[in-house]
Every structure is written in C-alpha cells, then in structure tokens.
Amino acid sequence: MLTKYIIERNVPGIGTHPADAYCGIAQQSKDVLVKQGPGIQWLESFVVQDKTYCVYLAESEDIIRDHAQKSGFPADRIEAVKTIIDPSLAPA
C-alpha cells in the first residue's frame, strides 16, 4: 500500500522561474519516476517563492529520498499524511 507524503524542497528563487523551466523540472522528475517503477507516484507540487511542496504516493520515505538524489532535487523534509480535512467535514 502506498502512503501519501508531503515533501518540502528548499529551492531558492523557484517561484521566479519562467513557465517553461517548470516543464524541464517536471520532465527530469518524471524520467526518474518511470525508472523507479510503481512504488512511487508524483501527484502535484505547489511552488512558492523559495520552496516547493510536493505531494507523492510512495512505499516509504526511502524511495522518496532515492528519487530526490537521482533527480537532483532536495527533499529537506518528508512527512507522511495522517489524514485529510476539508470543508465537507464541517456541518452544513
């Protein structure tokens, strides 16, 4: 079973990159993911000024760290998601 993780990556200035730079970053990550197989999946990433917050499904933190090392991206903090809350949980 895959666990959902949030990965915080410190990347100074990432939020100022031009749009086409994100395509290259995505391709670089995807190339490594394909080689790693079904034990890790990238769902989405949120870019802020100097960081990205990436959402992954993975077998373990180790496979995420392996992906980070092979793709050249930092994985400064990895947290397993315990539960998800959203407005639908609040009474009407």
Image: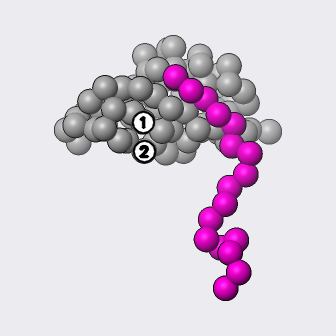
For the residues labelled 1 and 2, say whether their Cβ atoms are less than 8 Å apart.
yes
- Up/down of 92 relative to 25, above or below: below
Q: Residue at x 23, y 42 (%)?
A: 19
Tell me the crowding category of disc 1: few under 14, some 14 to 19, or many 20 or more residues within 10 angstroms, Cα based. many
The image's mark for residue 35 is none
Q: Which mark is residue 46?
A: 2
Q: Is residue 91 magenta?
A: yes
Q: Quadrant of the N terminus?
A: top right
**What is the x, y in percent for residue 92?**
67, 85
Furthest-bottom residue in this view: 92
For badge 2, the amino acid type reads: Phe
- The magenta span reads 75-92
Q: Position of residue 81 (x, y in %)?
A: 69, 43
Q: Position of residue 3 (x, y in %)?
A: 73, 39
| Magenta stretch secondary structure, dominant | loop
Outermost right residue = 1
- Give the image quarter of residue 6: top right
**Residue at point 66%, 60% (across, down):** 85
Q: Residue at x 43, y 16 (%)?
A: 72
In the rendered structure, does residue 43 fall within the stretch colored magenta?
no
Q: Residues within 10 Å of mark 2 (few under 14, many from 20)?
A: few
Q: Tag 1: residue type? A: Thr
Q: Which mark is residue 52?
A: 1
Question: Looking at the image, can residue 38 be seen?
Answer: no
Is residue 71 shown left or right of residue 21? right
Decide which of tag 1 and tag 2 comes sooner along the chain.
2
